[in-house]
Amino acid sequence: MDFLDLDFSTLQDIPPLQHYFETPRVSVTQKGLFSMNAAFRKAAGAQRRFLVKISPDGRYLVLYPTEPANVCFSAKNGYMTHKALAKSLKERGIQLPALYAVTWCQEREAWVGSCPELPSPPHLSELTKSAGAGKKPQARRNT
């Protein structure tokens, strides 16, 4: 084989394989089971009390570990029942179970979770189109 056209000094490592279970997540089920997966329990350490806030569209959950808590997951398994949260997500049109991949945000000192299964919001340009932009022009009547 001839590798003359390959510059080995330009080769880059591929991203490491990350298994589904290695991504920190919280989930909310139909019955209101609100839980931390094993990866999030490991990342959060012993922290199980959080102030949890939700974005208006339900796309994001933010868990603040240093604020007065409104949620306390079990110490051993990292879950709790929160039927009001499940109801709130349903009212926002989010299908349950909802999974939120969480990442530490140093700037906000919080775990920020996003639900990747939700469709992206429409672009601003789509929202500002005039109401009649898609209508066909009507033929004029001769009278």
Image (cartoon, rainbow, N blue to C red):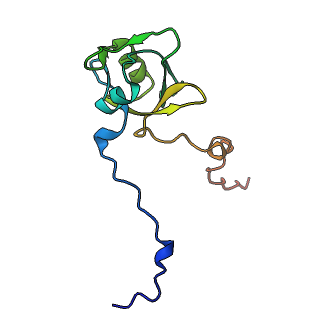
Tell me: residue 94, above or below residue 84: below
Q: Please tell me which residue is depicted at 62% across the width and 50% down the height of the picture.
A: 135
Report the number of numbered marks: 0
Quadrant occupied by the N terminus: bottom left
Res. 95 visible in picture: no
Residue 132, picture quadrant: top right
Q: Please tell me which residue is depicted at 41% across the width and 56% down the height of the picture.
A: 15
Residue 83, picture quadrant: top left
Q: Report the residue that reaches farthest toward the right.
A: 143
| Closer to the camera in the image, 56 or 113 | 113
Q: Position of residue 16 (x, y in %)?
A: 37, 54
Res. 58 visible in picture: yes
| Closer to the camera in the image, 117 or 75 | 75
| Closer to the camera in the image, 59 or 119 | 59
Q: Position of residue 100 (x, y in %)?
A: 40, 32
Q: Position of residue 46 (x, y in %)?
A: 36, 19
| Side of 56 where 41 appears, left or right | left
Q: Report the residue that reaches farthest toward the front.
A: 9
| Side of 62 where 26 appears, left or right | left
Tell me: residue 10, above or below residue 60: below
Q: Please tell me which residue is depicted at 41% across the width and 23% down the height of the picture.
A: 89
Q: Please tell me which residue is depicted at 54% across the width and 39% down the height of the picture.
A: 121
